[in-house]
Amino acid sequence: MLSPARLLALPLLLVCTPALAALASPEKTMVAAADKGHEQDIALLERLVAQNSGTRNIEGVKAVRDMVVPELEALGFQTRWVPMDAANRAGHLIATHKGAKGTTRMLLIGHLDTVFESSSPFQTATREGDQLHGPGAADDKGGVVVMLAALRAMKAAGSLKGANIEVVLTGDEESVGSPLDIARADLIAAGKRSDVALDFEGLVVIDGQDFGSVARRSSGSYTITATGKSAHSSGIFSDNVGYGAAYELARIIVAFRQELPEPNLTFNIGLIGSGATAILSEDEAEIHAIGKTNIIPPVAVARGDFRALTLDQIARVKSRMEAIVARHLPQTDATIVFKESYPPMPPTPGNTALLSALNAVNADLGLATMPALDPLKRGAGDISFVAPNVAGLAGMGPSSRGDHTPEERVDLSSFPRQIKRAALLMSRLAPQKPAR
């Protein structure tokens, strides 16, 4: 883990870097390269989207890897594949580019998989003017293409040669493999080796305004199991029978709604069932319940998720949930079991300084200043795994709509400005000498 002194030194370094009044000559070359390569970038995107790479389609994820590897190697990166058989996932593509010693070490993050498995009817990439409609067109194949195009623009301008860059493209961002300590070990290790992390998931645009993401919330889930006495319904609420499992579960859910709300926290119940039996499936996506209206149910099960901005908030919310669950109606019992998937990426001075550096780029490109995005406006992501160790910025990919649905469409007109932003930002960071 990086020392607090090192994390605090980076913001000072970035803030003190003077913004250029106009683009330097190599930066103009990058801008020209981004514009010139637009159709080449879209052609690559169409090939990537046409290949299904649902998280559990292991061969499909590897096929996308095989398309990306030549692109990285042509830019001078050394690539390696880290299999994830132990986590029941395809694996991760890691690429490294060695530059000048003692300069900023940048980590670029993206992913090869999508939410659309091989069984999904949504499989085709269709060009619709300035949009591409297809599975993963934005999340995250569009982000991968922006990353590659930015690196290509840097190479055209000569700024890639001295840059220390590590790329980690995970194969299971949409459904993280288990156990987590194996599935994310390589990403976390890369974060500890880095000074800056840039996440190439999608740019958020609201009412025509581009936003920078300096924070992302966690993603965790929980299972509540309530139990009670089974008896004829005529005895409900009596002293010797009590309230039954369904009312106990309802009490807990209502108390969550009334007592838990606070800033940057959301919590949801996505699956619920109760009856004489209520059996949660192995993949925790179904509950098979059997019961009758005149039988007080002895069991009730609910599955939900909650998202928070800091580790302290997660711990506090868990404690409050456990206290609510423990209050029990007469003749009932209940438990709650938590499962973590993504940690939070809290806002930090280092993250804010990176956004300031990006806004200096925006000024020189003639683009509007990007405010920090409300973390409620986006979901969790891989960059959160490295957040404790390195300053980071998310949303470096293209803008889109309909992500995670058959309406997913990426805005192709956003590619040139995102490529230019990334190329210039990385080129300006690359020669700096951060405190170690």
Image (cartoon, rainbow, N blue to C red):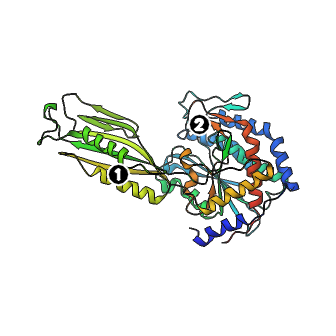
> Badge 1 is on which residue?
321
| Residue 193, x across and y down, in percent | 63, 64
Q: Name which residue lies at 55% across and 49% down.
A: 375
Which residue in the rendered view is the most extreme toward the right?
Answer: 25
Q: Name which residue lies at 69% across and 36% down.
A: 411
In the image, is residue 314 above or below residue 247? below
Tell me, for residue 49, which label it has, or none: none
* Front residue of this view, candidates 353 and 93: 353
Can residue 176 be seen by looking at this rendering?
A: yes
Q: Secondary structure at mark 2?
A: loop
Asked if disc 2 and disc 1 are in contact, CB closer than 8 Å, the reply is no
* Front residue of this view, candidates 12 and 400: 12
| Residue 266, x across and y down, in percent | 45, 46
* Front residue of this view, candidates 318 and 133: 318
Q: In the picture provided, is 74 more to the left or to the right than 231?
A: right
Disc 1 crowd rating (10 Å Cα; few below 14, some 14-19, many 20+) is: some
* Front residue of this view, candidates 75 and 383: 383
Disc 2 crowd rating (10 Å Cα; few below 14, some 14-19, many 20+) is: many
Q: In the picture provided, is 84 more to the left or to the right than 242?
A: right
Q: Secondary structure at mark 1?
A: helix
| Residue 396, x across and y down, in percent | 67, 48
In the image, is residue 22 above or below residue 269? below
> Badge 2 is on which residue?
403
Q: Amino acid at mark 1?
A: Met
